[in-house]
Amino acid sequence: MGLQKALTVFGIITFLTLMNMLVVTNPGMAVKIADQNISSSEISKIDQNKDVPFMEYAVDKGVEGLNKFILFTGFRNLTHGHLIMIIVGLFFIFLAIKYEYEPLLLIPIGTGIIIGNIPFFQDGGVNLQLGIYQEGSVLNYLYYGVTKGIYPPLIFLGIGAMTDFSSLISNPRLMLLGAAAQIGIFLTFLGALYAGFNMSEAGSIGIIGGADGPTAIFLASKLANGGIVHGYETKNLIGPIAIAAYSYMALVPVIQPPIMRLLTSKKERLIRMKPPRSVSKLEKILFPIVGLILTTFISPGALPLLGMLFFGNILKESGVTKRLADTARNSLIDIVTILLGLTVGASTQADVFLTSESLLIFVLGALSFMIATAGGVLFAKVMNIFQSEGNKINPLVGAAGVSAVPDSARVVQLEGLKNDPSNHLLMHAMAPNVAGVIGSAVAAGIMMSFLL
């Protein structure tokens, strides 16, 4: 029975492929759609001539219908670009399943890439309401949450409800490592300007160095969404920027360790740090309130992100809104992650995504992420110059200053254990890691204040 089904499917695919070849190789067949430039509206007209013999009329209409069917199949509209992007989508899914690289992100994004690159018939007069860029389609409505910056603050709400700031509160000096890692953002901003992007586009590209996908999408939706900023027309770079940011977040275990080992000595990697002190409930409640007011006064542009981040943390730490906190860190963030990943992936439609600008963004994004990692490690070494012997910081912890939570902190933990199986750095690394989330959002707000 299984063999029969397989043969049936194979037969259908073979039939459709042969029909596709006939249409492509024999332009004289049937209605000659391509040569006569017959529009889609003309194809659908029904011949009302009653003098034509019934059989001849039926055959003509059957052939015309078959041509129309083939015209609208994916086989007929397939391009090399579609194939390349579908392979990319499959590769993302492979990385997520085989190596568990950010599966909650890469599987929705990879599936979205495949969905966004299923080829379909398009011309100036037809809107099948299928693609993400076709007005009225379901994907277009869902993509509204990306282009208007709705999804990123909701992601930050969930992150806030999941985050424990105890390690940062107990050792505030580690916040400087999160700030130092943001150097990648500003250096890449200069690099993007040098590469020919305008100010707004360069600011959006630079934020990739923060290794924070929601922040990158939020800033790109404001500065590089295909609109007019400061009188200059910007390209729509949301798709390439989002894919680059999430790709490098997923590849944290691959990119960061070589840089960490290159910039540190064996002796430095063996440094043991004092256990973090116990933090009181009052401190946990006051931190998000004070943090909200202080950071948004410094960078009002980051209010949608930081406001939701600290709001989520207040829900968690107050102890009286457990249901709301549970919803924010479970159901809500899961739903938004699905929608965000799927629509961002679908936005990589081949004719929009496969450009020289996209390739350049990936190169700049990689440099940004590497500079950010190096910045955190090197700044930890600088801080150690001014620390007493018992208060020195293990420079590996500086790599967690990028805001890929909690993957960067896990990488630090693993690298520490490789050098000393009893040296646990996770709790120390979480401090610059969550500081990096705050730092990248503040940097995005500063970019907006200068460029929007």
Image (cartoon, grey):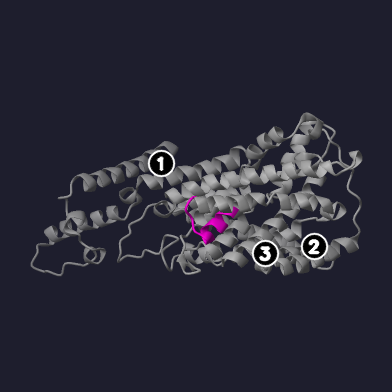
Q: What is the span of residues highlighted in magenta in the rendered image?
A: 195-206
| Image quadrant assignment for residue 13 | top left
Judge from the rendering whether residue 75 lies leftward or rightward of residue 384; answer left or right. Answer: left
Which mark, residue 305?
3
Number of numbered callouts drawn: 3
Q: Is residue 108 visible?
A: no
Residue shown at 84%/66% (left/top)?
A: 318
Q: Amino acid at mark 1?
A: Lys
Q: Quadrant of the N terminus?
A: top left
Judge from the rendering whether residue 208 lies leftward or rightward of residue 132; answer left or right. Answer: right
Q: Nearer the viewer, mark 2 or mark 3?
A: 3
Which mark, residue 5?
1
Q: Nearer the viewer, mark 1 or mark 3?
A: 3
Residue shown at 44%/38% (left/top)?
A: 2
Is label 1 in a helix, a strand or a loop? helix
Judge from the rendering whether residue 25 lies leftward or rightward of residue 96; answer left or right. Answer: left
Residue shown at 68%/69% (left/top)?
A: 300
Which mark, residue 316?
2
Q: Earlier in the sequence, mark 1 or mark 3?
A: 1
